Amino acid sequence: MRDRIGFFGGTFDPVHNGHLRLAENALTECGLRQVVFIPAATPPHKSLENLTPFSQRVEMLNEALQGRQEFVCSTVEAELPAPTYTVDTLRYLRKRYAPDTGLFFLTGLDAFLEITTWREYRELLRLASFIVSERDGEHYARQKNKLADLIGYFPQGRIWFGKDGAQPVFFLAGLPLALSSSMIRQRVRQNVSIRGMVPDGVYRYIEKYQIYRMKDA
Ligand code: ATP
């Protein structure tokens, strides 16, 4: 089987067990060799002011991924011109892998449902196969069907098939965890425990550097 690499973009502010669950499900269900977590350095859609510094988000990711050979963190987006769009990152990565390597891009359904707002999304759908996780146990069946129609995909069970070079989209069977980074930031601000929602190393890191204490969600 040809090599398959997953890329997981996000702000990861902070990385939490919901992200890890998605990566784990994608690895197993789609036969990936590796999942590369790519924290956004200057995301076009989020205000930088409220964002934890890139270096700290990377350190938290490294804590979370420790001991898992299949999971790595890449700081590639800090090296690319800002703001970084996923299509540019994937174009850059495409050149760095053998031509027969299958590239996969991991997202939650909330993010995927917005795909038509992403820069050059048609090109994006040609560059990588999306792997999509449901979020919070919801299925959004109607929005999904509408989107498939809009972007010209043909759903067949968990796989959507594209045309004109668009790669298939895979919907994971594995259930998501009902967690989000904003929920975690809010809990820290309100002094409510986040133990068990993030890996232990991330928990300790947030405590040590007092992250999220004073920030808006
Ligand atoms: P925020 O609450 O700040 O918006 P987030 O928890 O959604 O953050 P991001 O770093 O913005 O985290 O998300 C990166 C990707 O991970 C997105 O595609 C998002 O849909 C997905 N994701 C985040 N949390 C989960 C979860 N619990 N289950 C499945 N996918 C998730």
Image: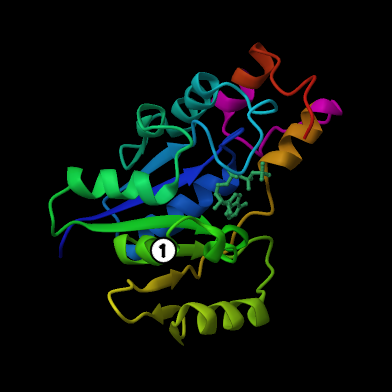
Locate residue 183, reporting x and y percent: 75, 41
Dot 1 alpha-carbon crowd within 10 angstroms: few under 14, some 14 to 19, many 20 or more: many
Is residue 102 rendered to the left or right of residue 175?
A: left
Q: Nearer the viewer, residue 83 or 7?
A: 83
Residue 29 can be seen, yes or no? no
Residue extending furthest top? 208
Q: Quadrant of residue 46?
A: top right
Can you say whether 102 is above or below 171 in the image?
above
What secondary structure predominates along the stretch shown in magenta? loop
Q: Secondary structure at mark 1?
A: strand
Q: Is residue 10 above or below residue 25?
A: above
The residue shown at (66%, 34%) is 47
Please state the horizontal and vertical placement of residue 71, each as a whole percent of the image: 36, 40
The response on whether ligand 1 sits within 8 Å of label 1 is no
Which amino acid type corresponds to the residue marked 1 in the rendered image? Phe
- The N terminus sits in image quarter: bottom left
Residue 84 lies in what quarter of the image? top left
x then y, percent, for residue 116: 53, 66
Q: Is residue 22 magenta?
A: no
Residue at 59% across, 48% down: 18
Q: Is residue 91 left or right of residue 188?
A: left
Q: Which residue position holds label 1?
A: 130
Q: Nearer the viewer, residue 197 or 138?
A: 138
One can see residue 207 in this view = yes
In the image, the segment drawn in magenta is 189-204
Quadrant hosting residue 92: top left
Which quarter shows the C terminus? Answer: top right
Q: Is residue 111 left or right of residue 28?
A: right
Horizontal and vertical percent position of residue 188 = 78, 28
